[in-house]
């Protein structure tokens, strides 16, 4: 089945530093989403980005579909960015919304 | 607009006990998903519905787990005879037609001791 690999598994930053999170997947994704999960909280969708580059605030997502990879860039990190970031894909193209998640990247931003 | 609502927020069981989780999706969302998220892992799909019909329950342990969505709105996930390995957060999500508008509830944290 579809596999989603995220790296790094964890990341520690000082406030103000930038972060680059990576997602690689085993077959062509027709749908790719980045989610954020605060410790103990719900999953919040950050980007729906099956291809190309999207920006929102300090976040940038870039997906290169034919290379089966996506990245999430966080600029000028803040302590409130701490939490777990998940990459999730759907590969069937049937618009089922059936997502396969990676194991996540745990981000800690220290003041 | 109200989000996806789940209850209870927490549950603690002894092995062998039963438990039910309830989910109220976003109004108008026809597709509802149940995910299991073990500690320090990503969510894993258990089952999903389009209206009242089960579309895929291949990852649902059918001997102890069951899920229904009788009117195509709210849904219940039930675990009969819970095991310690069922300890996880159970997440409900909904979407419209399986498209990008994908919203999760806050989950139910289950501890089986």
Image: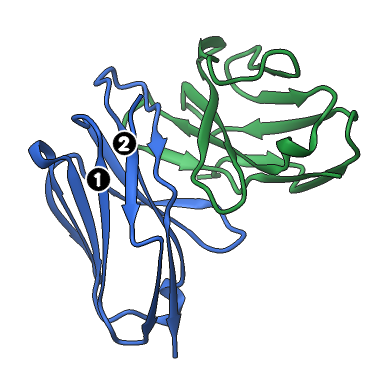
Asked whether, in this view, residue A82 is left or right of residue B59, the answer is left
Assign a secondary structure to mark 2. strand
Q: Which mark is in front, 2 or 1?
A: 1
Callout 2 and callout 1 share a chain: yes
The chain assigned the colour green in the figure is B
Q: Which mark is residue A75?
A: none
Q: Which residue of the protein is positioned furthest toward the bottom in this rendering?
A: A111
Q: Nearer the viewer, residue B14 or B105?
A: B14
> Pointer 2: what residue?
A89
Residue B45: horizontal and vertical position, in percent?
51, 29
Residue depicted at 72% across the width and 37% down the height = B85
Instruction: Work out which quarter of the rendered image holds the C terminus of chain B and state it.
Output: top right
Tell me what residue is drawn at x 27 percent, y 50 percent.
Answer: A23
Measuring from the top left, give residue A92's x and y in whole percent.
27, 20
Q: Colour of chain A?
A: blue
Q: Find residue A24 and name its label.
A: 1
Q: Is residue B101 left or right of residue B76?
A: left
């Amino acid at each position: 089945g579809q596999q989603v690999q995220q790296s790094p598994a964890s990341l520690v930053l000082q406030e103000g530093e930038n972060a680059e999170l990576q997602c690689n997947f085993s077959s062509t994704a027709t749908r790719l989403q980045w989610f954020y999960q605060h410790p103990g909280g719900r999953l919040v969708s950050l980007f729906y980005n099956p291809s190309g580059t999207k920006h929102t605030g300090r976040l940038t997502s870039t997906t290169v579909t034919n290379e089966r990879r996506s990245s999430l860039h966080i600029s000028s990190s803040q302590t409130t960015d701490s939490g777990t970031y998940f990459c999730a894909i759907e590969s069937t193209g049937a618009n089922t919304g059936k997502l396969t998640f990676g194991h996540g990247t745990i981000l800690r931003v220290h003041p | 607009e109200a989000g996806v609502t789940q209850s209870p927020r927490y549950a603690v069981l002894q092995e062998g006990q039963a438990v039910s989780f309830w989910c109220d999706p976003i109004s108008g969302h026809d597709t509802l998903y149940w995910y299991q998220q073990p500690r320090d892992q990503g969510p894993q799909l258990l089952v999903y519905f389009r209206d009242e019909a089960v579309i895929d329950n291949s990852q649902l342990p059918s001997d102890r787990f069951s899920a229904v969505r009788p009117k195509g709105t709210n849904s219940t996930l039930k675990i009969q005879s819970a095991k310690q390995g069922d300890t996880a957060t159970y997440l409900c999500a909904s979407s419209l037609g399986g498209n990008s508008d994908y919203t999760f509830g806050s989950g139910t944290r289950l501890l089986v001791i």
